[in-house]
Image (cartoon, helix red, strand yellow):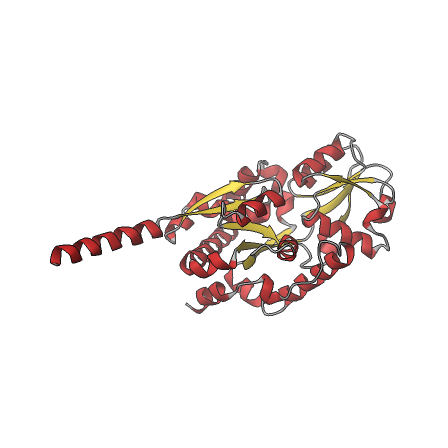
């Protein structure tokens, strides 16, 4: 009996150790707003909070979403607008931490002869459908009394859109940093004609997972939140080293990326608490309304904040 009990305890201990050692697979894109995740990896903040995290980079939102839905990923860094789209398509996805807000770091670029959004009428515009670029373009068009049908959409990821503009294959591109700075440095009359700064909170990103995974792994979710917080603080306290880590991760030199950091605000735990008192929820509602109005076939309704957010882990971390 004693041997049986000892064996049971041993097996239970091994089982718990294995469960604790499970790898958390996180999907990201080469966007500087996700930078603290690479900093957390580089500086050991995941390990500090007993997490085994593997970061995998994607170029397309839809590929990350598919990997999350098929459980090949546990967590993905996603634009808030993508979560609205995915929930409308029946994907179980909720945000548990606001990562960043973009201002000048998401933009519409154009070449010679195009100096405003209204000048885009009848022009070719490269952007990724369903991504943050889609939302920014639709918002800009709406503000100028136009619709998506007024331009010719060329489907393309953010990393490719800027290159297509430089190569002269399109008249305009909707993209984000570092591709904005890269495009502008090519000369040729390329310029920014609109940025996300026109609407605070329109372009934002969250750490997300399925509600099932969040409920089943509260300690891991809390650990990710703490590691992110450590990384944000590290970047603020060690800007040169932190930014260098991020620049390397997104495939850009620190010199090229430096101007872009001014256009992005990364949120720590305390700032999340403040922003999530209602302001962020209102921003998501506004984004959802734009998406529903401009794409009612796919965005049939505006999800509620409760459908889009799972804030219990953040509240638990903040309370400790």
The residue depicted at 51 percent of the width and 53 percent of the height is: 232
Q: Which residue reaches farthest left? A: 2
- Which quarter of the rendered picture does the N terminus lie within? bottom left
Q: Is residue 185 above or below residue 144?
A: above
**Residue 164 visible in the current orientation:** yes
In percent of width and height, residue 135 lies at 72, 52
Name the side, left or right, on which 16 lies relative to 219.
Answer: left
Q: How many marks?
A: 0
Percent position of residue 309, x then y: 57, 63
Q: Is residue 115 left or right of residue 314?
A: right
Residue occupying the point 48% across, 50% down: 74
Q: Nearer the viewer, residue 136 or 106?
A: 136
Is residue 195 something one can see in this rendering? Answer: no
Quadrant where the C terminus is found in the figure: bottom left
Nearest the eye: 190 or 146: 146
Above or below for 134 versus 287: above
Question: Percent from the top left, x then y, of residue 134?
Answer: 72, 48
In which image quadrant can residue 125 be found? Answer: top right
| Residue reaching furthest to the top | 167
Task: Name the residue at 59% across, 42% down.
Answer: 63
């Amino acid at each position: 009996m004693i041997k049986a009990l000892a064996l049971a305890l041993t097996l239970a201990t091994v089982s718990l150790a294995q469960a604790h050692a499970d790898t958390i697979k996180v999907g990201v894109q080469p966007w500087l707003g996700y930078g603290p995740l690479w900093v957390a990896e580089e500086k050991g903040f995941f390990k500090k909070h007993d997490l085994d995290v593997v970061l995998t980079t994607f170029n397309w939102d839809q590929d990350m979403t598919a990997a999350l839905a098929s459980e090949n990923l546990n967590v993905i860094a996603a634009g808030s607008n993508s979560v609205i789209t995915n929930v409308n398509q029946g994907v179980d996805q909720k945000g548990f931490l606001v990562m960043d807000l973009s201002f000048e770091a998401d933009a519409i670029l154009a070449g010679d002869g195009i100096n405003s959004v209204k000048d885009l009428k009848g022009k070719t515009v490269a952007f990724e459908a369903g991504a943050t670029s889609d939302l920014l373009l639709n918002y800009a068009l709406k503000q100028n009394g136009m619709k998506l049908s007024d331009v010719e959409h060329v489907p393309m990821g953010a990393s490719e859109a800027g290159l297509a503009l430089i190569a002269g294959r399109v008249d305009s591109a909707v993209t984000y940093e570092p591709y904005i700075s890269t495009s502008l440095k090519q000369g040729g009359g390329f310029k920014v004609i609109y940025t996300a700064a026109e609407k605070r909170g329109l372009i934002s990103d969250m750490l997300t997972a399925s509600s099932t995974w969040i409920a089943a792994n509260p300690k891991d979710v809390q650990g990710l939140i703490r590691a992110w917080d450590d990384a944000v603080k590290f970047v603020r306290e060690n800007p040169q080293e932190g930014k260098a880590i991020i620049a390397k991760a997104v495939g850009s030199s620190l010199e090229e990326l430096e101007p872009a950091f001014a256009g992005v605000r990364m949120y720590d735990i305390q700032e999340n608490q403040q922003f999530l008192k209602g302001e962020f929820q209102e921003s998501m509602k506004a984004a959802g309304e734009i998406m529903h109005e401009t794409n009612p076939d796919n965005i049939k309704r505006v999800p509620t904040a409760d459908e889009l957010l799972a804030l219990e882990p953040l509240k638990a971390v903040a309370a400790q």
